[in-house]
Each structure stands twice: as C-alpha cells, then as structure tokens.
Image (tube, rainbow, N blue to C red):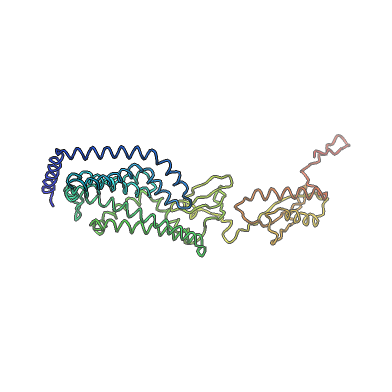
C-alpha cells in the first residue's frame, strides 16, 4: 500500500466514524462508558487499600510482588474492564451488536492498556517503562481500530536514502522497539547468568567476573544484531560507516578503551580479584568489585576509591593477598645497654604472641640489628592474617605488648642523652644534659 492509498483509506475510515458518531446509540454507549469509568474509580478508592495490605504480605518473591503492586495501582482500570465486559454481554443479549460496537472497542483498548502498563512494570527504569507501555498500547490501538496498515504506510512514506539503505520512519520505529526489547531481554538474561556464575564455587573470583562480563556484552551485541536484521537493515552496508565512527571514537575515547582492555587483562592474568588487599600509591584497602572501566577499592576509613584499570597495569601495585592472606610485619625498637639481649629477644617474641592476629604457627623472630648510640637496636618480625582488617592496628598492639612486657621485667627503653664537659682553668666538671 502506497502513501496515496493509505491517505484515501484513512479518509474513508474517518468518514465512517463521523457518520456513526451522529447516531443516537453512539451517545448512549459513550454515556455508559463514562458512567462505568466513574463507578470503577469510586469502587477502586474503597477496595484498593484492603487489597494492598494483602499484597504486602507476599514474602520472598520480589517479581510477584512488583506485578501485584502494579495491578493494585490499576485497580480502577481492572474494574472498568470488568464493568465493560458485563455491559457488553448485557447489550449483546438485548439489542443489536452494532449498538454495542463502541463498548467493544473501549473494552479492547482498556484491556490493551491494562496489559501494557502492568507488563511494563517489570522494567525498573520508570521512564523506559512508561515509554514502552505507551508505544505498546498505541500499536495495539491501531490494530484494534483497523488502521495499522494505513499507519505503517504513512510512516514508511517518510524515508531517507543512505546508499543501499532506505531509512524510513517506520524502520526507525521498528528498530527502536526491537532494539529496546531485545537489549532489555539480553540484559536480564545476562544478569541471571552472571548471578549463577558468581554463585559457583568451582571457579575463581577473576574467572567468574570475566565470564559474567563477556556474557553480558556478548548477549547485548547479539541482541542488537538480531534486532537490526529483523527490520531489514543490512549490517554489511554499515561496515564502512561503523569503521569510520569506530576510528573517531577510538581517538576520542583512548582512555576508556585502554581501561576496558586493561580490565580484561587483569581478569585474564588474575593479578587482582575481589577481596584482595592492595596498596597503590597512597591507597590501601580491599577490592570490592571489578568493573569494565575501574576497580572499586574500599579503604579502612570507609572511603571507596574508583581507580581506573589502567593504573593497575602501568603502576606498581602491592597485592598483600596474592598467594595467601598472611603478611609479615616488622617492628623496630631499642632497649638499654643494661639489658640482656638474649632475654630481650625472648620477651619480645612472647609479647608478640599475646596479640590475637599474630600467627602462632609461624613463630615470630627477634634479632639484634645494631649497637646504637644510646640503645641496643632490635627488629621484631611476625606474621599476621587477614590484612584487610588493618596493619597499623596490629603494629600498635604489638608495641603496647612490648611496653607492658618490658615494664614487668625491668627492661628499660632509653632516650637519647648527651654529656657536656665545661672547662674553667684547670678544673672541669661534667654536666649531664639528658
């Protein structure tokens, strides 16, 4: 059907409705529809609160609860549909079918609107849900009114030739609807597959993240290609155009592409994974999530840093839990020259073992490192587990344990002091400045 025939058909359809609108039963049916709608509104305002209390008792089924709430929000339309169905049955039983035609149209439109608005609620984005709901209802209304072919021919008339592709308004509309539906379905399926993969204990965290990301991206690309092919778009004709666009985007989004590739490399070489404790420049924390563009790192003070993936490839990263979750720490201290260094080493090891997070299986060691100017210098080395719980707090507890142990056993911790000898003539007297 070409554009001129579509216009002629639309004029004939409009003239028929104009003639029918002058009949008395048109006004009778319109009055019945308005009255039933007002009755449905009044009845819904009374029973909707009672039904909502019942619906809130649904536990453990968020999808069912969302659909139930969507139905409750449209109790008036549900009642209006029921009232129209009853009125249509009564009129068909007492008069001619032509005298209930408007009511049948209203019933079909209300049912289409009810289904479109409820089913669109499964989409979390409110704007997208409303848009899809309206588009679905408009299409259903065109089919119900019998002018879908005329509307399609009218939209197909407005076209823009692009080489071998004829881009019409109808093609754009179909592509938009199909792309939205297929991409949304791909995202839902990808999210479901990602949740199943993340719950698998047989795979490492990095492999789980990698499989989830490739599944989501692959499904979205497949959905897009299927949607475009379904509306008759030749994907091979877009090769040159997409190549030029890709080249321009590549120059403008070098960092984005670099971070994406770096993220894939990080997942493949398993250098970091969710739960690892890392240090990068001045940031120390544990990895919460690996994203396509950045890595989420949570520090001990509760701050969440979004660090680009490229930094984990080009900079020096300390992964405290790369092999295991054991970390060795050093604590340096000094004691008085009056103390026995053998006894000091034993006391220091015993003090370290009193701290809960110090690993007892890997026994701490204490070594004399130097004869200082005013003290015997030691280093105490010990292993701790779960570094994501902090390292400074462990050092602080070990130092307090050393202080208490040395104080109980009479081991002094010296402080620097100097002696100045002042000479006056032939007499001299030492002065202690400590």
Q: Is residue 141 left or right of residue 410?
A: left
Which of the pair 431/167 is nearer the observer? 167
Give above or below for 422 relative to 356. above
Which of the pair 371/196 is nearer the observer? 196
| Rendered-image quadrant of the C terminus | top right
Q: Is residue 32 left or right of residue 357?
A: left
Q: In the current view of this chain or complex, which residue is farthest to the front?
A: 94
Which of the pair 410/299 is nearer the observer? 299
Q: Position of residue 311 (x, y in %)?
A: 48, 52
Q: Quadrant of residue 73?
A: top left
Q: In the current view of this chain or complex, which residue is farthest to the top?
A: 424
Q: Position of residue 92 (x, y in %)?
A: 21, 48
Residue 160 visible, this orientation? no
Which of the pair 396/120 is nearer the observer? 120
Q: Position of residue 187 (x, y in %)?
A: 38, 54
Q: In the current view of this chain or complex, which residue is farthest to the right?
A: 427
Marks counted in the figure total: 0
Give above or below for 337 relative to 420. below
Residue 184 visible, this orientation? yes
Q: Position of residue 14 (x, y in %)?
A: 14, 42
């Amino acid at each position: 059907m070409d554009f001129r025939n579509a216009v002629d058909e639309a004029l004939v359809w409009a003239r028929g409705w104009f003639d029918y609108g002058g009949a008395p039963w048109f006004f009778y049916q319109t009055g019945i529809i308005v009255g039933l709608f007002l009755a449905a509104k009044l009845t819904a305002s009374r029973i909707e609160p009672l039904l909502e209390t019942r619906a809130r008792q649904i536990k453990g089924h968020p999808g069912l609860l969302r659909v139930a709430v969507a139905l409750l929000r449209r109790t008036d339309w549900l009642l209006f549909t029921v009232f129209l169905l009853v009125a249509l049955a009564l009129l068909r039983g007492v008069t001619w079918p032509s005298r209930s035609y408007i009511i049948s149209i209203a019933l079909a439109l209300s049912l289409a609107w009810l289904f479109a608005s409820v089913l669109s609620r499964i989409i979390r984005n409110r704007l997208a849900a409303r848009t899809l709901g309206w588009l679905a209802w408009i299409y259903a209304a065109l089919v119900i009114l019998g002018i879908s072919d005329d509307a399609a021919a009218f939209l197909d008339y407005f076209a823009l030739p692009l080489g071998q592709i004829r881009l019409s308004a109808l093609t754009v509309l179909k592509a938009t609807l199909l792309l939205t539906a297929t991409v949304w379905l791909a995202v839902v399926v990808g999210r479901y597959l990602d949740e199943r993969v993340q719950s698998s204990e047989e795979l490492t965290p990095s492999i789980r993240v990698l499989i989830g990301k490739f599944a989501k991206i692959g499904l979205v690309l497949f959905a897009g290609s299927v949607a475009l092919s379904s509306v008759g778009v030749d994907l091979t004709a877009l090769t040159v155009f997409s190549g030029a666009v890709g080249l321009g985007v590549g120059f403008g989004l070098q960092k984005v592409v670099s971070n994406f590739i770096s993220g894939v490399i990080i997942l493949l070489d398993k250098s970091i994974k969710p739960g690892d404790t890392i240090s990068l420049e001045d940031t120390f924390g544990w990895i919460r999530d690996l994203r396509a563009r950045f890595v989420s790192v949570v520090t001990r003070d509760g701050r969440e840093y979004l660090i680009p993936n490229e930094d984990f490839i080009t900079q020096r990263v300390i992964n405290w839990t790369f092999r295991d979750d054991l970390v060795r720490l050093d604590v340096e201290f000094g004691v008085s020259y009056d103390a026995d260094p053998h006894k000091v080493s034993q006391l220091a090891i015993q003090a370290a073992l009193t701290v809960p997070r110090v690993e007892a299986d890997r026994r701490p060691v204490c070594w004399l490192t130097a004869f200082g100017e005013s003290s015997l210098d030691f280093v105490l080395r010990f292993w701790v587990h779960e570094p994501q719980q902090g390292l400074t707090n462990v050092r602080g507890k070990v130092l307090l344990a050393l202080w208490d142990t040395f104080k109980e056993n009479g081991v002094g911790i010296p402080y620097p002091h100097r002696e100045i000898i002042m000479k006056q003539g032939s007499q001299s007297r030492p002065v202690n400045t400590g």
